[in-house]
Amino acid sequence: MYYSSGNYEAFVRPLKPEGVEHKSAYIVGTGLAALSAACYLVRDGQMPGRHIHIFEKDPIPGGACDGWEYPGLGYVMRGGREMDNHFEVMWDLFRSIPSIEDPNLSVLDEYYYLNKRDPNYSLCRATVDRGQDAHTDGKFGLSDKGAMEIMRLFFTPDEVLYDRPITDFFSHEVLDSNFWLYWRTMFAFENWHSALEMKLYIRRYIHHIGGLPDFSALRFTRYNQYESMILPMVKYLERAGVQFHYNTKVTDIRFEISAGKKIARQLHLLTIEGKQDIDLTEDDLVFLTPGGCVENSALGSQDSPAAYSTDLKEGGGWDLWGRVAAQDPSFGHPDKFCSDPEKTNWMSATVTTLDDKIPPYIQQICQRDPFSGKVVTGGIVTVKDSNWLLSWTFNRQPQFRSQPKGQLVGWIYGLFSDRPGNFVKKPMRECTGKEICMEWLYHLGVPEEQIEDLAAHSANTIPCMMPYITAFFMPRAKGDRPNVVPEGAVNFAFIGQFAETPRDTIFTTEYSMRTGMEAVYTLLDIDRGVPEVWGSVYDVRDLLNATVKLRDGKRITDLDLGFKERMALKEILKAISGSDVEKLMREYHVI
């Protein structure tokens, strides 16, 4: 497997790998990584679909990318996905997946024209004082010292950042700024999370720094992530003859490990009928999704809280990874990620408005008609003075194809599930859906005497507790995540958010799909390049632009410098005078 960029290889159809018709594939899970691996086995690996088996412990596919109407409960979306125009693997695959709305279009076609005709941006990024605009006004609000702290992290070698939290590098100069408000609520970073992941994120999305304050950097799907992404992939695979096995847990994978060679030899399954073992040969490829950010997630209801359960059970992603990791050091260290759920949990809730009483409060804040079918909030609205650090969003409506006219479906989440609310004096994790809705309505500015009635009769709210949702952000070191294909691996690969691939960043659709592609291309030795991670971190134009945008448009000549530094800068500017370097610096308003 190798990387490529540009369109020389982008549209090449790979030759059929030698002997692929004699191989089989066993894929654990049905999240984006697993489905991507299956799609690449079919499209580029040209493996017969009937040879591909996908095991899913739940009755429906999708993993973390869900979106479902549960009978007797209501609409549920545990999370949401924000996409970037430079998700190179994602768009490489989705150009080949037919849209379920219009078979003449691909998922990429559908997505491209949707976002071109209705571009995303926010008109109110944050509120205070019960629904009043917080007037972050597109500013990062960083001091020179805070900007320097970010720059130092940006240039710090990875190995220096191993096992270290963000607070080792950022002081209140960053942590009290709008920058950190935008960042932590958009990506769900906590102060104690990994400094290494923070650095990787800044480098990966340096080309989008200017679009963070108003979310103009982002693009969204038409419907919820299940209907817009997962369902088209599942339909594509079913047409190819791929075998889906639901309600089937993979409880263990046994490996034969010798000097320089590692072979997956047996799968242990637990199905409705009972236990089953599958013996494997070197021609049987195994794709394992270790861990799981939505593992142990639990739903509540309008009148009951979601359970907070951290026990790791047999057949779950963490238990399976633990059993696999015990067999070889190169298979990673799951305990680094799942041993402290108090540092990896947050809660979400799906709210459905049932009449015309709540939408005007939404419209007042987002400054758009939420029933227009176009962009509504344009990303999350963060309640800056919320004890839960509550954020909420309504994407294009309807969010579900079955959604009744006149209803809105939105998403709420709180980073601090253990703190009492501002209006509902209980921790979010102890609240029913109705109580979470009450807290949200309070922050929308609904008159207090109307809040309980509206939460009870004008909305249906389903809470969801996720104890391990940000497990991948925990401080880590090299080797804690297994390589996609570990050294010496013959017939297996790790995929998903807890597999290691260079330069890309976790908690993204692209990361999951990239690991699926790299796994297939490596194990089948497909002769076509995997699209390289977008190289904006090496583009001086993006670096210059981000430098100025991060400082809210201030030039380097506005820096508060000492005498020696001012003299040095003066000499540098004199040296580049009349050159293309000076032109470039002026073009991007650096000087």
Image (tube, rainbow, N blue to C red):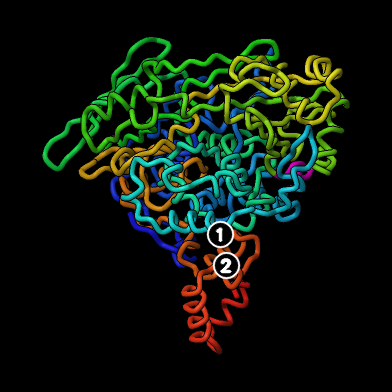
Give the quadrant of the C terminus. Answer: bottom right
Residue 471: percent from the left, percent from the top? 44, 32
> What's drawn in magenta, residue-wise?
374-378
Mark 2 is on which residue type? Leu
- Front residue of this view, candidates 89 and 360: 360
Residue drawn 67% across the image and 34% down it = 391
Residue nearer the viewer, 492 or 437: 437
Instruction: Look at mark 1 in the image and give the residue it sits on.
Output: 144
Q: Residue furthest toward the bottom?
A: 578
Q: Is residue 440 visible?
A: yes
Q: Residues within 10 Å of mark 2 (few under 14, many from 20)?
A: few
Q: Position of residue 276 (x, y in %)?
A: 32, 16
Label 2, secondary structure: give it: loop
Residue position for label 2: 559
> Mark 1: which amino acid?
Asp
Question: Regarding mark 1 in the picture, which secondary structure is present there?
Answer: helix
- At horizontal 64% and vertical 16% (from top left) the residue drawn is 426
Closer to the chain start, of discs 1 and 2, is 1
Q: Report the quarter where the N terminus lies.
A: bottom left
